[in-house]
């Protein structure tokens, strides 16, 4: 790796119960947390900064593009 290069890793985040491993992290939540029709999962680092996001259904908001390009704020309005 050259100087200044960013190292990237893949980690799967699970809301259910399981054993943490190098590439899998579990929240160990017992209750359902996802909406069956649509929802959005946002991953943030330990400083609260946006890392990644995945959405499905019709719950996508207009600040998706801002978040993907380093923004970490949204005014809360949805399509």
Image (spheres, helix red, strand yellow):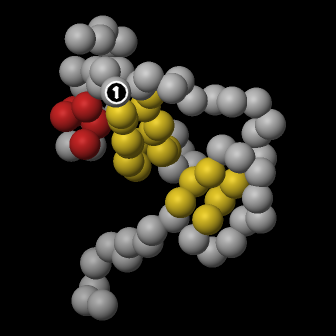
Q: Is residue 31 left or right of residue 41?
A: right
Q: Is residue 31 left or right of residue 9?
A: right
Q: Is residue 61 above or below residue 48?
A: above
Q: Is residue 42 above or below residue 78?
A: below
Mark 1 element type: loop
Residue at the front extreme of this rendering: 36
Quarter location, residue 50: top left
Q: Position of residue 70 (x, y in %)?
A: 27, 43
Q: Position of residue 35 (x, y in %)?
A: 53, 24
Q: Is residue 72 left or right of residue 30?
A: left
Name which residue lies at 30% across and 90% down. Answer: 1
Q: Decide: few, some or many residues near mark 1? Use Cα within 10 Å; few <14, some 14-19, many ≥20.
A: few
Residue at the bottom extreme of this rendering: 1
Name which residue lies at 57% across and 71% down. Answer: 23
Query: Where the C terminus falls, by quadrant?
Result: top left
Name which residue lies at 64% across and 29% down. Answer: 33
Q: Is residue 73 visible?
A: no
Which residue has dot 1 on it?
57
Q: Is residue 49 left or right of residue 35?
A: left
Viewer-proximal residue among 3 and 52: 52
Q: Is residue 11 above or below residue 53?
A: below
Quarter location, residue 53: top left
Quarter location, residue 3: bottom left
Name which residue lies at 28% across and 78% down. Answer: 5
Q: Is residue 38 visible?
A: yes
């Amino acid at each position: 790796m050259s100087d200044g290069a960013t190292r990237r890793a893949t980690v799967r985040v699970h809301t259910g119960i399981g054993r943490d491993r190098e590439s899998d992290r579990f929240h160990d939540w017992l209750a359902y947390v996802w909406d069956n029709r649509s929802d959005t999962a946002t991953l943030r680092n330990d400083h609260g900064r946006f890392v990644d996001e995945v959405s499905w259904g019709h719950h996508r908001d207009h600040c998706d593009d801002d978040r993907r390009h380093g923004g970490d704020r949204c005014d809360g309005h949805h399509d």
